[in-house]
Image (cartoon, rainbow, N blue to C red):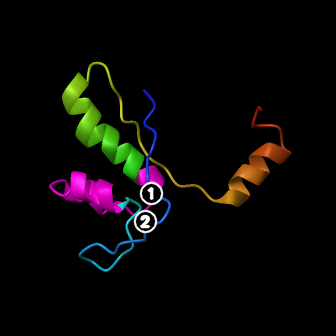
Amino acid sequence: MIRIQKARRNDKAIKNANGVVSVLTSDEQHLWRENNELISSPNKEVLEQRYVKNVIIPLLGPKHVDAGVSNSIKWSLLVFLDTYGFLVS
């Protein structure tokens, strides 16, 4: 499944209740206003995982969808792995 974000070009960044700029457009914030976990996502990667976990899995069921686990790694680790041939393009 591919979710394509549609946003107005002039949509300004909107702060959530905590004063943090949201990664969602104003229309998306209005759409998901009842799902605080989606609205409070700190970045797009976390938002995408939460979307799968909170929206797609309840619709299709955990038997058919796996939200996975999000892990952050440092850029230097990727460079190291690539240097020693552990990453395959």
The residue shown at (24%, 23%) is 60
Which amino acid lies under the numbered mark 1 shown in the image of this protein? Arg
Q: Which residue is mark 1?
A: 8
Query: What residue occupies the far left of the structure in this picture?
Result: 34
Residue 49 magenta: no
Q: Can residue 54 be spotted in the picture? A: yes
**Magenta segment main secondary structure:** helix
Residue 64 locus on image (x, y percent) = 31, 19
Residue 43 locus on image (x, y percent) = 45, 60
The residue shown at (44%, 45%) is 5
Secondary structure beneath dot 1 equals loop
Q: Is residue 63 above or below residue 74?
A: above
Q: Is 23 or 73 nearer to us in this picture?
A: 23
**Disc number for residue 11:** 2
Query: What residue occupies the far bottom of the structure in this picture?
Result: 19
Please tell me how crowded label 1 is: few (under 14), some (14-19), or many (20+) other residues with Cα within 10 Å: few
Please tell me how crowded label 2 is: few (under 14), some (14-19), or many (20+) other residues with Cα within 10 Å: few
Q: Range of the magenta residues?
A: 26-46
Residue 41 magenta: yes
Q: In the rendered view, does 14 fall on the left or right side of 75? A: left
Q: Is residue 2 above or below residue 82?
A: above
Query: What residue occupies the far top of the structure in this picture?
Result: 63
The residue shown at (33%, 75%) is 15
In the picture, residue 68 is in which quadrant? top left
Q: Quadrant of the N terminus?
A: top left
